Image (tube, grey):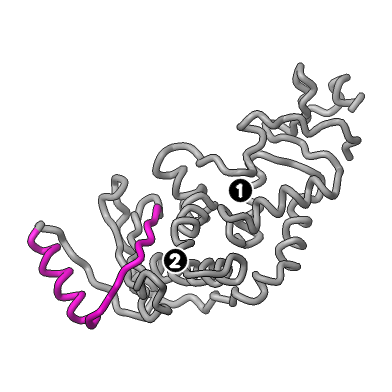
Amino acid sequence: MEEVKKGGKLDFILSDDEILRFRTRLCVPNDGDLKRELLEKAHHSRLAIHLGGTKMYKDLRQDYWWLGMKRDIAQFVAQCLVCQQVKTEHQRPTGTLQPLSIPEWKWEHITMYFVIGLPRTLGGNNTIWVIVDRLTTSTHFLPMKVNFSMDHLASLYVREIKALGTKLSFSTAFHPQTNGQSERLIQVLEDLLRACTLDLKGNWDDYLPLVEFAYNNSFQASIGMGPFEGLYGRKCQSPVCWDNVGERKLLGLELV
């Protein structure tokens, strides 16, 4: 700390109210309980829902810093029992992809997908309607009651959408090469729903808004930020944003 005050550590800044920062990021004291509380809120709170290690690190590093941060996050996620139970390896050898045109504006081009065959909830829902903005990857998850065949639903959808003059492009079901963005999103959605039902119990449609928030507020490598930030130009506040909501006094312990 004395070396910082003397200007010996150029990357570290001590403000007038004695808040220590590494560049613009808040320095977290070398206190195991404090670090664990921060990791728990960033990983398995109701607004995070068991993010992977990479997403969790990308999100936290925007606001916080401590020595060995990436290693601590990786170890924390690896020790999470729920993550080990619900998450599977999704990586497969890359094939020949047909790239889609890049939209010029938000919500100009969207993709839609139906996740069917889910357990029927007390509200009668058994399907999730997934709507994705292709530019920002911002997503909506809508619970639905489907009491007729998907062929009938598809024909109804096409008939109504065509009446609005909308251009349609179809992708083949269970072939991610035709729409990799949506297929990967469905895998993430299923993992998050499994984690919710293990952690929180109850009907899956009760937690769908939390899943939507967790996804839209988490880092996406394809756009270099969270979908919420891509859509609105700023990050959404969450319980881990202590530094932004006034809970700044994280000092008082010796830092390493």
Residue 234 image offset from top left, x and y in percent:
48, 37
Label 1 sits on what residue type? Asp
Which image quadrant is residue 180 in?
bottom left
| Quarter holding residue 132 | bottom left
Mark linked to residue 77: none
Callouts 1 and 2 close, C-beta under 8 Å? no
Find residue 153 and report its horizontal and vertical position in percent.
Answer: 20, 75
Of labels 1 and 2, earlier in sequence is 1
Left or right relative to 61: residue 249: right
- Work out which quarter of the rendered image holds the C terminus and state it: top right
What's the residue type where badge 2 is placed? Leu
> Residue under circle 2?
185
How many neighbours does mark 2 have within 10 angstroms: few (below 14), some (14-19), or many (20 or more)?
A: some
Callout 1: few (<14), some (14-19), or many (20+) C-alpha neighbours within 10 Å? many
Query: Percent position (x, y) of residue 169?
Result: 22, 68
Q: CA distance from mark 1 to mark 2?
A: 18 Å
Q: Nearer the viewer, residue 116 or 162?
A: 116
Q: Secondary structure at mark 2?
A: helix
